[in-house]
Amino acid sequence: MGSKNCDILIHGGGPVGLACAAWTLQKFPDANLILLDRNPADDADLVAADSRGIALSHGSKLLLNTINAWPTDCADIHRVHVSQAGRFGRALMTREELQQDALGHIVRYRDIHLTIRQALREIKAKSPNFIWQHLDGNHEHPVINARCIVHAEGGLFTKQDWVESGRDYGQSALVGLVEAENAAPHQAWERFTAEGPLAVLPSHYGSNILNLVWCGAPESSQQRLQLSDAEFLISLQNEFGSRIGRFLKIQDRRLYQLGLNYRKQITKANEVWIGNAAQTLHPVAGQGLNLGLRDAFLLAEKLAELFSGVANTQTPEQIQNTLESYAQSRKADRTTTIGLTDFMARVFTSNLTPIVMARGLALSALQWLPPVKTALARQMMFGRR
Ligand SMILES: Cc1cc2nc3c(=O)[nH]c(=O)nc-3n(C[C@H](O)[C@H](O)[C@H](O)COP(=O)(O)OP(=O)(O)OC[C@H]3O[C@@H](n4cnc5c(N)ncnc54)[C@H](O)[C@@H]3O)c2cc1C
C-alpha cells in the first residue's frame, strides 16, 4: 500500500474524534482530513454495543445541535436529589432555580456514537478531501504523512496504553438498567454510600426504567455483578432505600474500573490529544464526554482557521503555535473539571468521620446557599468559560 499525505489526521472514531472531524469540516469543507476509525463501517454492527447511560450537559446539547447530532432517544433531568446513605445532609437542585429547560440529559453511549456518525456522513457528502478510513483486521494499517496529528483514541481507565498523572480510586462502576415501582419522571438521584456514589438516572424508556451507576470497591462490585437478579435487587434496595418504591427488575449489568489518568501536556510539536486520550475521569460528576466535546469543538475551530488559509503554506512552527494556543485556551476548563471531579471522587468515597461530617455540611450548605449551588451547576452544565 502506498503512503498518503494530509493536513489533519485524526486517530479514533469515538464520539470525540468524530465530532472533531465534523466540526472541522463544517467550518472548512475543503479540509484535507483523514479519520482513522477502528469501529466497523456498518452501524448495524454497533447497535448491540455499549448501552451505558451518559449524562450530557445542556452545553453539550447546544454543541451537538450545531452539527445536527442530538440523539432523539434522550431523557431530560429536571431535578437532582443528592444525599448520603444513613447520614445527614441532602441537596435538591431543580431546573426552575437555574432557569433552564433541563439540568442535563441522559443518552446511551451507543446512541451518541451513532448519531454523530450519521452527522459526519452528511457532512462528508460536502467535503471533497475528507477520507474516513475504517481499520479492520483485514486491512494493512495505512502509511500516512500528516502535518497535524489529533489523538482521540479514548479508552477506559486501565485499558489505555499510556499512564501519566492521576489516581486509582480503587473503585469500579456497575452500570445497568433497573426498573422501579414508583419513580418520579425526570428525576435523578445521587446517593453517597459507604463505598462510593450510587446514581439512579432517568432513561428514555419511561419514568420507571432507570439507568444505574453504582460505584463501589472492585471486589464488592464484582460480587454484585455475579449475584442473581433477585439477590442484586435486594442489595440495591438496602443501599438506596425506598424513595422510589421497590426495585423490580435489573438488566444489562456491566462493570468498569474507575480512575483518573491525564496528560499534563496535551500537545507535542504537531501532535495534540483530546477527549479520553487527554484525560480519563471518574464518572461521579458526569463530565468526561462533556469535557471531550468541548476539546473537540475548540480544536476544530483552531484547525479550520489555520488550514483554510492558502494550501500548504502553514509552516511547522505555525502548526505548533496553533496547537499550543489551543492547549492554553483549554487550560482553565480542563484544570477545573479534572480538579472538581477528582475532589468529588475522593471526598464522596471517604469514610473518615470528619470527612463524612464535612460532606453532610457541604450538602446542607449547597441547599441553603443558592449562589454556590448555581455556580456549581453552571460549571457542570457549561464548563469553565
Ligand atoms: C461508567 C462510566 C460512566 C460514564 N458516565 C459519563 C457521564 O455521565 N457523562 C460524561 O460526560 N462522561 C461519562 N463517562 C465518560 C465517557 O464515556 C468518556 O469520556 C467518553 O466516552 C470519551 O469519548 P472519546 O471519544 O474520547 O473516547 P472513546 O469513547 O473511548 O472512543 C474512542 C474510540 O477510538 C477507537 N480507537 C482506539 N484506538 C484507536 C486507534 N489506534 N486508531 C483508531 N481508533 C482507535 C476506539 O475503538 C473507540 O471507538 C463515563 C465513563 C464510564 C466508564
Image (cartoon, rainbow, N blue to C red):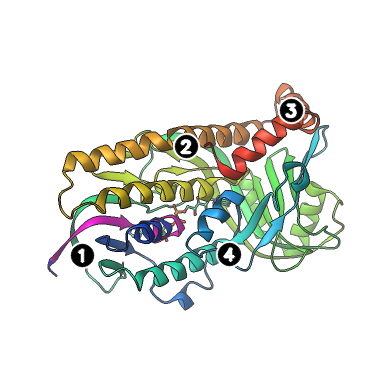
Q: What is the x, y in percent for residue 217?
A: 62, 43
Q: Amino acid at mark 1?
A: Pro
Q: Residues within 10 Å of mark 4 (few under 14, many from 20)?
A: some
Mark 1–mark 2 distance (CA, rounded to whole Å): 33 Å
Tell whether circle 3 marks a residue whose Cβ is less than 8 angstroms from ligand 1: no
Q: Which residue is mark 1?
A: 142
Say if 101 sits above or below 252 in the image: above
Using the image, tell me which numbered label, if any, was put on residue 334.
2
Residue 229: quarter of image: bottom right
Using the image, tell me which numbered label, if any, was put on residue 51.
4
Q: Which residue does the image show at 86% across and 51% down from the upper left?
A: 243
Residue contact at pointers 1 and 3, CB within 8 angstroms: no
Please tell me which residue lies in front, 165 or 289.
289
Name the element at disc 2.
helix
Using the image, tell me which numbered label, if any, was put on residue 298.
none
The span shown in magenta is 3-18
Name the element at disc 3.
helix
Q: Is residue 219 left or right of residue 97?
A: left
Q: Which residue is mark 3?
A: 362
Name the element at disc 4.
loop
Q: Is residue 107 magenta?
A: no
